[in-house]
């Protein structure tokens, strides 16, 4: 193999490898560019009475909105069944219809629908309290 041919092969290989490295190298976000979702499992603020038209249980002890997730979470000294009953009654009275429910003693997930809106309620009980996460979405 001639010297010129070897040089061309090495040059083409170097360009190819550089291009592959440029294309496949993932961009790693910096901490400043990464949104801060906070700790959705540990709400810290004083609870509110209503979030985006959705009532918050009066038993709530801590609450916090997580705008990036379109979620409001709160803690309350209640059971999964009490949360279920509260939201079935109160959401029905303002036009929400339950489309899915999966309660049990360990946790609960409920989905309600109103027009194009979807409300997901997740309940995680722990030591006599429950963490309730309300997430609003669109259909």
Image: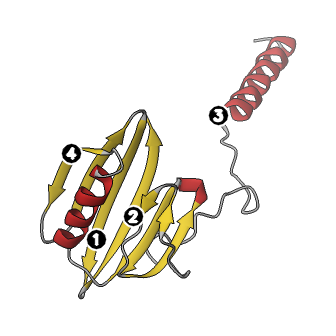
Q: CA distance from mark 3 to mark 4?
A: 42 Å
Q: Mark 1 or mark 3: which comes first in sequence? A: 3
In-front residue for pair 1/72: 72
Q: Mark 4 or mark 1: which comes first in sequence? A: 4
Q: Mark 4 or mark 2: which comes first in sequence? A: 4
Q: Residue at x 30, y 52 (%)?
A: 93
Q: Mark 3 or mark 4: which comes first in sequence? A: 3
Secondary element at image label 4: strand
Percent position (x, y) of residue 114? Answer: 37, 39
Tell me the crowding category of disc 2: few under 14, some 14 to 19, or many 20 or more residues within 10 angstroms, Cα based: many
Q: Mark 2 or mark 3: which comes first in sequence? A: 3
Residue 123, relative to residue 60: is it above or below?
Answer: above
Residue with the mark numbered 3: 24
Residue 133, disc: 2
Residue 100, disc: 4
Residue with the mark numbered 1: 124
Percent position (x, y) of residue 4? Answer: 87, 13
């Amino acid at each position: 193999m001639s010297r010129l041919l070897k040089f061309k092969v090495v040059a083409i290989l170097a360009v190819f490898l550089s291009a592959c490295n440029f294309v496949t190298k993932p961009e790693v976000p910096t901490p400043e560019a990464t949104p801060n979702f906070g700790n959705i499992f540990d709400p810290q603020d004083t609870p509110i009475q209503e979030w985006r038209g959705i009532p918050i249980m009066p038993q709530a002890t801590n609450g916090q909105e997580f705008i990036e997730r379109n979620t409001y979470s709160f803690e309350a000294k209640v059971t999964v069944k009490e949360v279920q009953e509260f939201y079935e009654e109160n959401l029905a009275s303002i036009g929400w219809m339950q489309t899915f429910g999966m309660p049990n003693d360990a946790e609960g997930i409920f989905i309600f629908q109103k027009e194009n809106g979807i409300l997901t309620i997740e309940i995680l009980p722990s030591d006599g309290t429950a963490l309730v996460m309300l997430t609003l979405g669109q259909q």
